Image: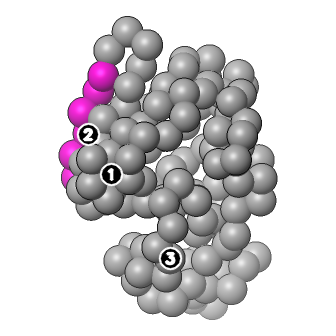
Amino acid sequence: MSEPVSGATRDVAGAQKVNLAAAFAQFNEHWSPRIIGELNGQHVKLAKFQGEFVWHQHAHEDEMFLVVRGSFAMQLRDRTVSLGEGEFLIVPRGVEHRPVAAEEVWVVLFEPAGTLNTGSAGGERTVREPPRL
């Protein structure tokens, strides 16, 4: 199990409480997810978005995007879904998508461990092993 992040506390049973603002304050890079926790084969990741990402899909993984601060648009091939603070979207496996954020947005991602951020697209924005906070 990883060391607690700044702003996180761990009790005797190993339960971890995370302060999201403190965790997001630890990095500035956009489109570079950080692993903040794990549960049941899932990674909980933090990411900051700004600008346009690449069109991609995940053949075997669903992804959940929870907006903590700001807003962004999830472009799908047939429509665009706008998301604001406190809202989340689950993108089912196999659905091509592209997040676009006019201004910086903070997002919590829930996805199976090993999920590549660029899915099928690959390329220079791929983060093969996201760092742990």
For residue 64, side relative to residue 34 (left or right): left
The residue sitting at the top extreme is 78
Residue 81 highlighted magenta (yes or no): yes
Amino acid at dot 2: Leu
Q: Residue at x 32, y 51 (%)?
A: 67
Looking at the image, residue 21 sits to the left or right of residue 30; the answer is left
Is disc 2 in contact with disc 3, using a CB cutoff of under 8 Å?
Answer: no
Residue 57, horizontal then vertical, whole percent: 62, 25
Residue 35 lies, in percent from the top left, at 63, 65
Magenta residues? 80-88
Badge 1 amino acid:
Val
Q: Which residue is mark 1?
A: 67
Residue bearing the label numbered 2: 83
Q: Residues within 10 Å of mark 1 (few under 14, many from 20)?
A: many
Number of numbered discs overlaid on the protein picture: 3
Distance CA(mark 2)–CA(mark 3): 22 Å
Judged by depth in the image, the label closer to the viewer, 3 or 1, is: 3
In the rendered image of this protein, does residue 12 appear above or below residue 90? below
- Reading the chain from its start, which is encountered first: label 3 or label 1? 3
Residue at 54% across, 20% down:
96
